[in-house]
Amino acid sequence: MVRHRRGRRCPCFAVGVLLVLLVARVAPVGAQERPSALYQTDQFNETVSFRQSVCDLQQKYDRRETTLENALEGLELHTVHAISQYFQLKDGAINEEYPGLTAVILDELASRAKFTWRNSFATTGPPMAGKTWTQLLQWTTDTYDLSVDWWAQSIHRLGLGISYTEGWYDASIIMVAQKNTNESKFDPWSWLDPFATSVWVMICVSIVFSGLVYWFLERIDPKSDKRALHNSPIENIFLSGIVFTNHFEFHPRTDAARLFTLSLAFWALITGAAYTANLASFLVAANAPQLEISSVNDAVQRQLNICVFESTQADEALTSEYPKANIIRKKLEDEVYLGVVSGECGVAVVTMSSWRYFERDAKVNGGCHLDWVGRTYMFVSAGFTTTLDSGTLCTSLIRDVLNLHLMRMKEEGVLDNAWDNYLKRTESIDCVSRKDDSPSVMDTSSGQLDLSDMGGIFLFHVVLSVAALLAALIGKGYRWKKKRDAKLKAPLPLEGMIEVIQRRETQLTRVSTGNNDEWSENEKFTKVKKTEPLAQMVKEIDQLTQDHGNQAATMEEMNDNIATIMNLLNETQ
């Protein structure tokens, strides 16, 4: 029955109804299960009401002619559905492949309670400008038998005469924020963080400058340091560099050198102390646990921007308790989460079931960077609604029958299965399997510095150590080669040396035959023994002189023989 909202008949409305019925009659069969033109009207149109009287069904039940579960049998229920992620049309009609979660639940209720709704439903969108969701809720329940959406319960709404069915949607209010990411990442240059690049450049310039200054002082007065540093500017720069590490290796002896080194040491003291203090501050701060946000009150006290779905029950509850909070209201539900992703808001205040849906939405949580934080702010249930009417049109009977079946569906797990199937169908990213389904807590790391912080300086030291070893080996090889080349190129005074050896051999031979009576028998015996290797050496040198050529091994052997001969000659003196 089409009735005027206040019970007064509209004189011209009957003509309109007839026209609508005519259109419905001539409409093609394929138009079924689309929003019915008979029951579609503009938002907040208070001139019509599509609620129907079920008082005859109520009386039938009162007379015990039927049971409560079958009290709506044969009724064509006039419903209004909010277009959302839970009820969407395909090409203007219900999608038969998957009609949406609310349609699935309502189909199950219709099957159990033996009523119909698919040919007598209307749709509506978000509230028009200047209106709230509560106002939209009140209008839909006043205009239709059943308002199908996730209407959250509140004392204010109950006071308006709104009657709720058993909840199928968890509208408990929670907070969602960016995840606490304290993952350690190896940074080989973290030890450079305490100083800006310009400061490091000035430190390097100061070290080189100081080394050259001390070298110049040595050039002016070689007695400026105990060591002779006037010929090695590189060594001066090196000694200046290790002063930065608080190791002082200069030994000044003049007043000018002492004055300069005093200035250098003081610079190194201040610079090193500033580096040490700032390094500790940087590294400890990098490992400090993030502040915990355990409640909405924490977010408000820290003056975080809080995103919320505009004019919803969550918005009303938050505004009522925290009127001075930094609340940023969003017209669309996904924008609430995107506000956190973009950094516009520190946290989002949302419902639990909403989070379960958008947590799996790649457009909102593509990097799985959002997480439920803190405690549940308020436990709220949400479901379908009717108007509170037990006498005029007896609409409360509809609520009672639906409640009976919804409670049975909960006990049987039908609602949970419907939710799981819905989330599986709509999921575009799997962030749930990567974490526990519980709110995040504050990171409890000890704050100790690990290799991700200090590894850079160790790596730097190892690289320089290896470089120093390679340089030392290369230098040693170069010096050995240079020494060998010098030996090969050195002239051998063979002719003069052979002449001396031969002359000395002749003298020793005469001594051994007794030509010199001044020597004792033992001395003679000793000198004779000395001549035996000399004679052999002379022969070898003669041979080597004739055919040594340019072979390195021969030249080295010749040098060894000559050295031996010279030692024997000295012993025969």
Image (cartoon, grey):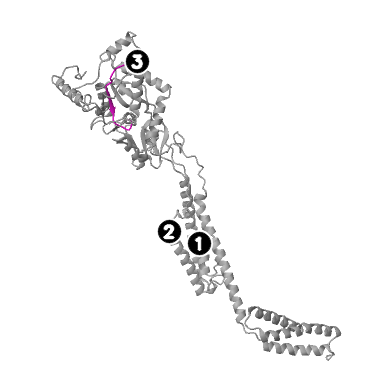
> Which picture quadrant has residue 366?
top left
Upstream in sequence: badge 2 or badge 1: 2
> Is 191 situated left or right of 402 in this image?
right
Residue tagged 3: 70
Callout 2: 10 Å neighbours few (<14), some, many (20+)? Answer: few
Q: Which mark is residue 265?
A: 1
Q: Which mark is residue 143?
A: none
Secondary structure, mark 1, is helix
Residue tagged 2: 199
Q: Which mark's residue is nearer the viewer, 1 or 3?
A: 3
- For the record, the magenta segment spans 70-86
Is 478 located above or below residue 19 in the figure? below
- Number of labels in the image equals 3
In the image, residue 288 lies at what x, y percent?
A: 47, 44
Q: Which mark's residue is nearer the viewer, 2 or 1?
A: 2
Quarter containing the N terminus: top left
Name the amino acid, label 3.
Asn
Residue at (20, 25) in percent of width and height: 24
In the image, residue 63 lies at what x, y percent?
A: 32, 8
